[in-house]
Amino acid sequence: MSSIHHQRSAAPSSCGHTGLIVSFLPQDHHRGCDFGAMLQRWALTAHLDGDCPANSSLCPRWSQRISRNQRPKHNCEKTSKEPTAHKSDLPAKGQNPQSPADCPFTPLGCTYKGSRDMMKDHEKSSVAAHMSLVLPLLLRIQNGLPAENGFGDYKPAGIHSGEPGEEGIATDCGHHNGSVPESDLISQICVMESRIQVAENIMSVMSREVESFSAKVTAVLEERDEGQRKLRVCEAKIADLRCTIAKKEIEMNELHVHLATLEQTTYDGIFLWKISDFIRKCQDASVGRTASLYSPAFYTARYGYKVCLRIYLNGDGAGRGTHISLFFAIMRGEHDVLLSWPFKHKVTFMLLDQSNREHLIDAFRPDAFSASFQRPVNDMNIASGCPLFCPLSRLQSGHSAYVKDDTIFIRCIIDTSA
């Protein structure tokens, strides 16, 4: 129960009674008064209107309670005499101090809004939550990926920006009842740093393994290139060997021909020439594929003249298409210097009847003035002989025994006795 001591004073119409006035003043008056006001009853109204220091009002600029006694001294423009405050704690000009404001960590994802008094409480109670918003940015900077436009453009993954159609999780730091303690956050940062260090070590080991594998791959590639180079060398050698083998095969064929020739060579001036596959060779001669055939060389004596025969199975000159033409040719020999020239010996041709009944015979004597019988200056002189040796109709006759088993035999006899 509030009471005021009533005592006598010299004021006009003073009351001569002194005592307690019980329950006269409002309860709020004495509660806000800094001194026990010993008042007379007639001075109570004046005390409440102007003299009570608890009767204060709110400054519309600085949000401060000012008593009536301080009002003459209060000047809103003289900021230097007022208690200093951080610029961020002062309301903007024309802004209501009680209007909601954004949290300073709004660019990082905090969505809290409230008055300035509530904002201070929010900042104190949400330190751990605000650190959890700063952590991703610090990790990004540590990994060498700083935000290009500063902190204002950085937005952690999962923060809702408030734009239409954008999905995300709204983070209100001021309303998390289970905020992470700062010590736990620091321990989490340490764990993340240790994990980052482990990852870096793993990356270093993997990098060394990759370098080792790359070196092995390089060595394998070098070995492959060396193998390919050796393979190319071997292929070149094989190609050379094939060429050599082909040449040797040609030489061997020539040797076989020469050996066959030597086997057929005679040294007494008598030569028997066997012509097999007669029909095919006649067809080749008729179409001009193989006009003539040469016999192996033979000799009139061991060191005598070297000669050969030349036959046209479809004829030559006057006998073309109607007769077999047979000619005699003198070849250049190893002992020509020891022989007498021109060649003067009689030459006889015989187409043998393989039934031994009627041989076809023709002979001639050399013309001493013909170039065909002079000493050869080339490998072979111009052949000379019988262009009408044998009619083709005679060979094609069914009663002819000149051709048997698709083979004919021609004998040449050189008379060296004369």
Image (tube, grey):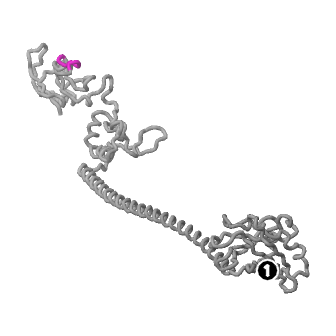
The residue shown at (86%, 67%) is: 319
The region drawn magenta spans 72-78
Q: Residue reaching furthest bottom? A: 356
Amino acid tagged 1: Phe
Residue that lies at the very extreme toward the top in this rendered image: 12
Q: Main secondary structure of the magenta part?
A: loop
Q: Can you tell which quarter of the image residue 217 is in?
A: bottom left
Q: Is residue 132 magenta?
A: no
Residue drawn where x is 20% and y is 21% of the image: 79
* 41 lies above or below 318: above
Left/right placement of residue 372 relative to residue 73 reads right
- The foreground one among 194 and 94 is 194
Q: Estimate the x, y position of residue 113 in percent, counting from the top left.
A: 35, 36
State the image quarter where residue 33 is shown: top left
x and y, in percent, of residue 102 in the image: 34, 35
Q: Residues within 10 Å of mark 1 (few under 14, many from 20)?
A: some
Q: Position of residue 57 (x, y in %)?
A: 24, 23
The image quadrant where one finds the C terminus is bottom right
Element type at mark 1: strand
For this rendering, which residue is in front, 200 or 123?
Answer: 200
Q: How many numbered discs sit on the rendered protein? A: 1
Residue beneath disc 1: 409
Image position of 63 (left or right of 263): left
- Left/right placement of residue 412 relative to residue 36 reads right
Q: Nearer the viewer, residue 418 or 68?
A: 418
Is residue 3 something that shows in the picture? yes
**Which residue sits at x=82%, y=81%?**
352
**Vertical placement of 169 versus 392: above or below?**
above
